[in-house]
Structures are given as C-alpha cells and as structure tokens.
Amino acid sequence: MTIRSAWGLLAGGVALAAFGFAPGADGGGSLPVRENIGTVDAGAARPEKAAAIRSVNLLRRTSRRVAPRTMIRRSTPAAEGLDAEVLAGAFQRAAAIPHMYSMLVIRNRAIVAEEYFEGRTGTTPEPVASVGKSILGALVGIAYRDGYLPDLDQRMIDFFPEYDIDSLDPRKRDITIRHLLKMRAGYPFDSSTEYFNQLSRSYDWMRFIIVSWALETEPGTAWNYSSASSHLLGGILTKATGLSLRDFANQHLFGPMGLEIGYWPRDRQGYCVGHGDVELSPLQLASFGQMMLEHGRWRGRQIVPSWWIKRSFADYSDTWYGNDIWPYRGISYGYLWWHADVDDHHVYFAWGHGGQFITVVPSLDMVVVTTAYNFVGDFTDNSWDTEGAIFRLIATDVLPAAY
C-alpha cells in the first residue's frame, strides 16, 4: 500500500530515519455514549499498517502546493513551527490504532501532515457519523442569516402541524429551534441500539420522534445528547428552505468553498438524516474545519456568519462527561459543537462515532482531522476503545507538537 504523506522531512532536510522512515524505503465511520471511553493497546501496528509505514513516500512540499480538491496549501511541520519529531511519533501511533483511516494536521492554514490507511486517500468519502451534526449547525446559521429561519425561538411544532395531534405530549409544543441546537429539547440520551432499532422500524421517522419518542425532561431545562433532536432540526431546515440538507449545503456551504457533498442518506419521507452519516472526505473535513477556525471565512468570502461561529463555540451546557475523558477537561456543549480544555488550550470539536473528529484549536492555529471505521450500530467496547485511543492521540501526541 502506498500512503501519501505531507510531513516528509524534518527541519533542515533530515529524513525520518530515526523513526524507521526513509524516502523510497522498501516495506517488504455520532454518537457519544455515557460510559467512560476505554483504552486500546497501540503498542504495535498491525502487519499491513507496519508495512505501509515502512514504505511511506516522503514528499517534499512547498508553501505554494495546493491540496487536491481543497484550497489549503501544503507545508512542512518545521516551516509552521511544529516539532517534526513529536509529530512523526504521533503518526506512528496513529498507524497502530485499529480501524484508523486517516489523520491530517493543519497549522497556519497549511496541511503539514497527512496519512491515509487501509486503502483510503484524502478524497475518499466516508460516513462521518455525528460530525454531520456540526455541519448541520453551520447550515442553520446560514439559514438564520439569510432569513429562512427568522426566529430561533420559533416552536418546532410550527414546522410539523401534521403531527400536532390531540394526544401529543403538550410539552413538545414548547420545543424551539434553539433547544434543538443546544441539545436541550428534553429528549433522552439516544446513542443506543434501542433507539435506532425503533427508529429504523418506523415508517415515518419524524412522526416517531415527535409523537412517540417520550421526553425525559422539560424542554430547555437540561442537556442530553439527542440524535432525535438533530433529525428534527434537519427537517425544520428542509421545510424552511424547500431544499434537502444536501442541496442546501451544496448551494450555500460547500459549493461556495469549491466543494460538493456526494451522498447524504435519507429517511423514508425523503429527509436527509439530520443526526449524521453524510459522506465527506478527509480533505473536505479539513476545509470545513479551517473555515470554522477562520470565523466562517474561506478565501476572503464569509461563508458562515462570524457571529454564528461565536455562538456555536459558546459554552451553553455542561455535559455528563465532565473530566471523564482524560486529558480533556470540562467537556461542554454549544450549538452542535463540543468544547473542552486540553493542557492550557481550549479546543472545539465535531465528534462522530468510532473516531471521526474535526478538532479546532484557535490558540495554536491548528485543525486536526481523523476518520476511522464508524462502527454503525455497534455501541460496544469495540467502538469506544478505538474512539478513546483517537481522543488521546490528538491531545497527548498531536497538539504537543505545537508547544
């Protein structure tokens, strides 16, 4: 397997021989859960990954090189102030994590490091699980700016009068768009086989969520991670704009960035799945993350309002993770984005089941993207162990290259 690498050479042109890398060397898919994230032994790479690492091509990149299907230039770690040896060690450990597909590091608006495993490339689309929620959040911000959604405190049920039946829990008439954005609509935690089995058996997903899926708390009073809430929010956006999420995203978000979404799964009524699994490539995720880092701007054009980015990155709710995912501290939630402290830095991240992450670190001018097998329907330790290993990889191996 040939793996493309942008991190090629250490400062001063010294090759990565100390880590077993040399030019031309011959090697011979959210949904978080309440349980603590487990551990995984990344001490030894699987044979196919070890062989791939030994045969990695080290490509010299210049600041004038542009990544395919993005407008992000490529550079080297040293040129952007990163410790190349620390970053090389991070990529070694990434290769040892089971089911890892890709990792990209962006610093100072440049891709300084990228690796792809198991036959993937930078343009291979993957279902990104609940990273799609953070993309949905950006779409809501665009729709709010453009007047499709004039009031974030408008009731959810106003968009679905067909489900406002006599037997409806009256509290559901109080759910607003803002509640759905903050995951404070009152729905229970639903990253579970039970919820998704019931949802998939339902002919009408919106009716199931609005009429049948019971609330756990009063709307607006408590945070709880809810994919049901995001699917409702996606439906509201479709009703308000007259476009599917995919079409609205291609016209107003990714299209203006020179990108395009291919596949976005739909429910039986034709609504794109609001809670996740849109398919995007690592380079598309990197572009989206960089746009968020730059306060919604992309090559001089304001794609998402800067004030919406500020709202998305605000801390509205503590989560029940708290300090449980070491070394992330004070894990909280904004408008469909997660927040936490890592060492002395505040990080914002889009989090998809199985290890899909876009991590944005403004204080370091960094974006880190990972993709992995998303373990669809698997809520066992198999998925959480891989996910936890990627969490720690970013915080303890990648980000320290900047400090």
Image (cartoon, grey):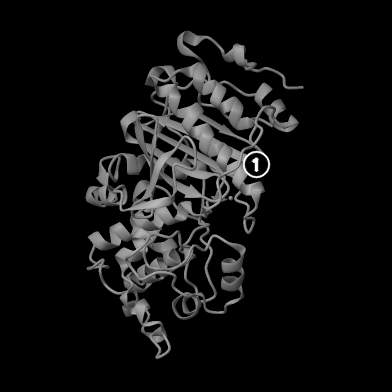
Q: 192 or 19: which is nearer to us?
A: 192
Question: Image point 60% across, 67% down: which residue?
Answer: 194
Name the spot of residue 300 as percent of width and height, x first.
25, 40
Q: Residues within 10 Å of mark 1 (few under 14, many from 20)?
A: many
Residue highlighted by disc 1: 99
Asked if one can make out residue 3 in the rendered structure from this viewpoint, the answer is: no
195 in relation to 372, above or below: below
Q: Quadrant of residue 242?
A: bottom left
Question: Image point 36% across, 47% down: which residue?
Answer: 257
The single residue placed furthest to the bottom in the displayed view is 166
Name the spot of residue 219 as percent of width and height, x first.
34, 70
Name the spot of residue 250 as percent of width and height, x first.
40, 57
Horizontal placement of 214 versus 18: left or right?
left
Name the spot of residue 93 as percent of width and height, x first.
60, 28
Asked if one can make out residue 5 in the rendered structure from this viewpoint, the answer is: yes
332 in relation to 344, above or below: below
Question: Image point 60% across, 40% down: which residue?
Answer: 101
